[in-house]
Image (cartoon, rainbow, N blue to C red):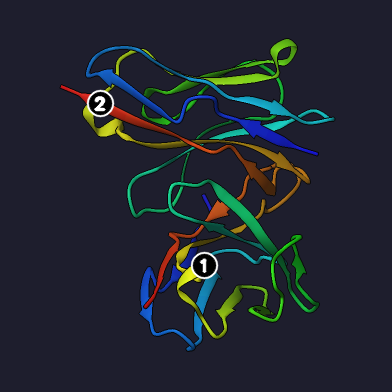
Amino acid sequence: AQSVTQPDIHITVSEGASLELRCNYSYGATPYLFWYVQSPGQGLQLLLKYFSGDTLVQGIKGFEAEFKRSQSSFNLRKPSVHWSDAAEYFCAVGVEYGNKLVFGAGTILRVKS
Amino acid sequence: GAVVSQHPSRVICKSGTSVKIECRSLDFQATTMFWYRQFPKQSLMLMATSNEGSKATYEQGVEKDKFLINHASLTLSTLTVTSAHPEDSSFYICSAPALDRRNTEAFFGQGTRLTVV
């Protein structure tokens, strides 16, 4: 069965510091991978997605993620975090051509000034 | 990108009453929609797949008689929480899948925060 693991429940970084959120997946076929961000009380916003091709994917708001098949990972990175990035981040693997999603448990990002 | 509109965004209801949540695809047709639920401090879990013109498909452990899904048209799916109880309080969010196989992305509604008192 498909599964997604986000090992870090909470992460706190200083504003301006770099960020990496970890994501590992388990899926038998070529995965469709996503990162979403959810602000408190809000819906989901897609940050970026990977389907095929270049393993380094650029997204919105300065985020990027790298797909590493050998490690079954799809870690999210940002070189310099802004206070407005504080939110919860979800990694997801898509089944059925990416339509149906299996989500990780989420990582809550806190940004300290 | 495609737009999915979900209403209401927040609802408070009394125990024992029913609540209907609507999910509309505004600028495209969706033969399938997905309904997810997110309990406090937990991740989103797929509840059911809504299929236009046929019965919904429920995930294991989801009561189909409690969570009624109707996909009446190619732009509207509804989730009705019947005889709601406080333990049904959650964040419910719908999504509509890619418009074609080349665009493998699901578009999410804004979500509905249900509080049962």
Task: Name the residue tied to disc 2.
Answer: A111
Task: Name the residue tied to disc 1.
Answer: B26
Q: Is residue B18 above or below residue A92?
A: below
Q: State the SS at label 2.
A: strand
Are the numbered discs 1 and 2 placed on the same chain, yes or no? no
Tag 2: amino acid: Val
> Is A84 positioned to the left or the right of A24 in the image?
left
Location of residue A42 in the rendering, given as x and y in whole percent from the top left corner: 37, 53
Q: Which quarter of the figure has residue B67?
A: bottom right
Q: Is residue A93 above or below residue A21?
A: below
Which residue ends up furthest to the right in the rendered image? Answer: A28
Location of residue A40 in the rendering, given as x and y in whole percent from the top left corner: 32, 49
Q: Nearer the viewer, residue A3 or A37?
A: A3
Q: Chain of mark 2?
A: A
* Residue at (58% x, 24% y) in the render: A23
Q: Residues within 10 Å of mark 2 (few under 14, many from 20)?
A: some
Contact between labelled residues 2 and 1, with CB atoms less than 8 Å apart = no
> Is A26 positioned to the left or the right of B46 in the image?
right
* Residue at (63% x, 45% y) in the render: B105
How far apart are labels 1 and 2 at the CA level?
35 Å
Q: Nearer the viewer, residue A29 or A102?
A: A102
* Front of the two marks 1 and 2: 2
